[in-house]
């Protein structure tokens, strides 16, 4: 009888630990998703008018016709 009681106590303890671990993992995932979404939307993308490649607006170089990707071929005048 004691043996069955100890198995039940250990099982309940393991179940409680699993519940705590799952809750913590959900909280970590939610905070990681929130950080990734904020970082991704912080910098908009623009299209190079010469070759059509999308680059972050902070990396785009101004050209005579519009933003360019900064590659030497795209910076040369046609």
Image (spheres, rainbow, N blue to C red):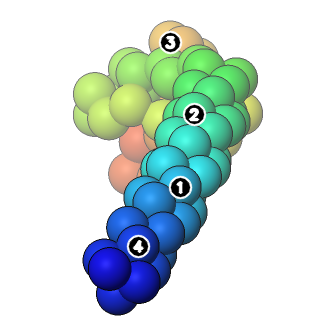
- Tell me the mark number nearer the camera, choosing from 2 and 1: 1
List x then y, in percent, for residue 20.
Answer: 59, 52
Considering the numbered disc 3 on the image, is that residue within a helix, a strand or a loop?
Answer: loop
Residue depicted at x 63% and y 28%: 34
Upstream in sequence: badge 2 or badge 1: 1
**Residue 11 is drawn in which quadrant?**
bottom left
Give the residue pinned by disc 2.
Answer: 30
Dot 3 alpha-carbon crowd within 10 angstroms: few under 14, some 14 to 19, many 20 or more: few
Q: Nearer the viewer, mark 3 or mark 2?
A: 2
Farthest residue, direction bottom:
3
Around disc 1, counting alpha carbons within 10 Å, would you say few (fewer than 14), some (14 to 19), or many (20 or more)?
Answer: few
**Can residue 78 be seen?**
no
Marks 1 and 3: in contact by CB < 8 Å? no
Mark 4 lies on a secondary structure that is helix
User: Which residue is label 4 attached to?
Assistant: 5
- Label 1 or label 4, whichever comes before in sequence order: 4
> Residue sitting at 53 percent across and 55 percent down?
16
Q: Position of residue 9 (x, y in %)?
A: 48, 69
Residue on which disc 1 sits: 16
Count the marks.
4
Q: Earlier in the sequence, mark 3 or mark 2?
A: 2
Judged by depth in the image, the label closer to the viewer, 4 or 3, is 4
Label 4 or label 2, whichever comes before in sequence order:
4
Give 54 or 30, whichever is nearer the viewer.
Answer: 30
Please name the residue that numbered disc 3 is placed on: 65
How far apart are labels 1 and 4 at the CA level?
17 Å
Report if the CB atoms under discs 1 and 4 are less than 8 Å apart.
no
Q: Is residue 27 above or below residue 18?
A: above
Q: Residue furthest top?
A: 65
């Amino acid at each position: 009888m004691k043996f069955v009681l100890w198995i039940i106590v250990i099982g309940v303890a393991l179940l409680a630990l699993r519940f705590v671990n799952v809750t913590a993992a959900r909280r970590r995932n939610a905070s990681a998703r929130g950080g990734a979404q904020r970082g991704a939307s912080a910098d908009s993308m623009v299209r190079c008018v010469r070759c059509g490649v999308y680059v972050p607006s902070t990396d785009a170089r101004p050209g005579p016709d519009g933003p360019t990707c900064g590659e030497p071929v795209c910076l040369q005048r046609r």
